[in-house]
Amino acid sequence: MRLRTLDTAGDLAGKRALVRVDFNVPMQDGRVSDDTRLRAALPTLRALSVRGAKVILLAHFDRPKGKVVPSMSLKPVVGPLSDLLEQAVAFAPDCIGPAAQDLIAAAEPGGVILLENLRFHAGEEADDPAFAAALAELGDLYVDDAFSAAHRAHASTTGLAKLLPAYAGLAMELELDALDKALGAPVRPVLGVVGGSKVSTKLDLLKNLVTKLDYLAIGGGMANTFLFAQGHPVGASYCEKDLKATAEEIMQLAAAHGCQLLLPLDVVVSERLEPNAPHFIRALDDVDEAERILDAGPQTIAKLNAVVDEVKTLIWNGPLGVFEVPPFDAATVAVARHAAARAKAGALIAVAGGGDTVSAMHHAGVSADLTFVSTAGGAFLEWMEGKPLPGVEALQG
Ligand code: 3PG
Ligand code: MG
């Protein structure tokens, strides 16, 4: 199904464009500490502004659960956003009603106005038609540039798309295009790397991926559950032993679909999870009772790098080890750098995303060299699980 894109929106001069962005940015002491999501929205905001639209930004911050929580105001975003845009950004203390209406009426074409946290109203998350209608009154068209909120069926995503002419913004388009290249219609062979601690949170994801990929590498704590299911000792490692049958089921599903599972061939263990704690490389059957598996070992790295050399597409979610605590970042960093070099050379389409993955890729220093790094958390996972994203569906047809 085709996405309705902004180039089909016609003459925008003087029109009021309601733009859903994801400004749910990391903040520390009331200041924006990572502006990646603000930067992602700039192309759409500039494009609308240049076309003479009044640009009205709709966003949520954190989870105030329908109440006004002053510490969850979007006001701290105004300064950094106007610096990045090199343009003043007005701020409306409420996202509906007279305060917003008056500011919008007074704005010049090309002006940018940020409205206060949508989630201060319970109607947002409830996708309440009356709240959506109150938002719709503020605009002539709706633009959704917030892929990372597209797994939510809220008033500002699905609700508004029903009430106004609705278009995907440029960041949304870019994101969907990258995701399609990685999993929708990938150039084969395609390798998935999935890490992180829990199999339990990534069951649907693993089950979907083994039906679509040629190779699936499993790392991080969740690999321990698979090693345990195969009868290897895991010592004092994090391991969901109650999911043995599930791990077996996933291994069978992979075999049935011709997906080669790549589990660790060797591991790095330590008795303590501390920076530079004494650590050892172990063969799979040599893990002692007191030892914890904290990273994949050098043979595993070599194998994964060899597969990276063979495939044309890579999709990556989750670290291979405890990358926050060196030296247990070694496998994640080594494979990420190898993949990034291949991507930079044009030999590999490499897409990474979801929660920890972005920080792991930043840590490895490879974010700029990968084909695409998604800033989406939950939305990226649900998309990898093969679930329809209501915010995206609302823009199709
Ligand atoms: C995110 O940060 O993942 C998105 O902004 C969605 O936030 P939510 O999980 O609170 O809906
Ligand atoms: Mg979230």
Image (spheres, rainbow, N blue to C red):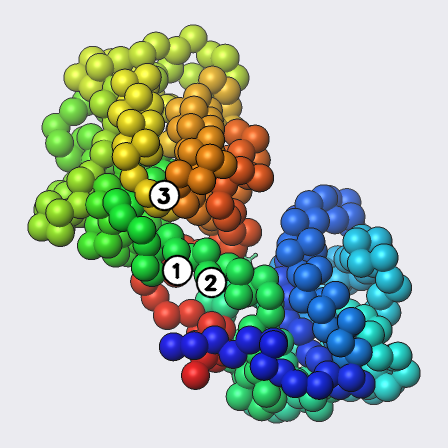
4 displayed left or right of 191: right
Q: Residues within 10 Å of mark 3 (few under 14, many from 20)?
A: many
Are the residues at dot 3 and dot 1 in contact (C-beta closer than 8 Å)?
A: no
Label 1 and label 2: CA atoms lie apart by 6 Å
Ligand 1 shown in quarter = bottom right
Identity of the amino acid at label 1? Answer: Asp
Disc 3 within 8 angstroms of ligand 1 (CB) = no
Identity of the amino acid at label 2? Answer: Leu
Residue 29 lies, with reference to residue 150, above or below; the image says above
User: Residue 118: x, y in percent?
Assistant: 67, 73
* Pointer 1 residue: 180
Are the residues at dot 3 and dot 2 in contact (C-beta closer than 8 Å)?
A: no
* Pointer 2 residue: 176
User: Residue 356: x, y in percent?
Assistant: 49, 42
Identity of the amino acid at label 3? Answer: Leu
Q: Which of the labelled discs sits on residue 314, or is there none?
A: 3
Q: Is residue 300 visible?
A: yes
Are the residues at dot 1 and dot 2 in contact (C-beta closer than 8 Å)?
A: yes
277 displayed left or right of 73: left
User: What residue is at 62 percent from the left and 62 percent from the top?
Assistant: 22
Q: Which of the labelled discs sits on residue 127, or is there none?
A: none
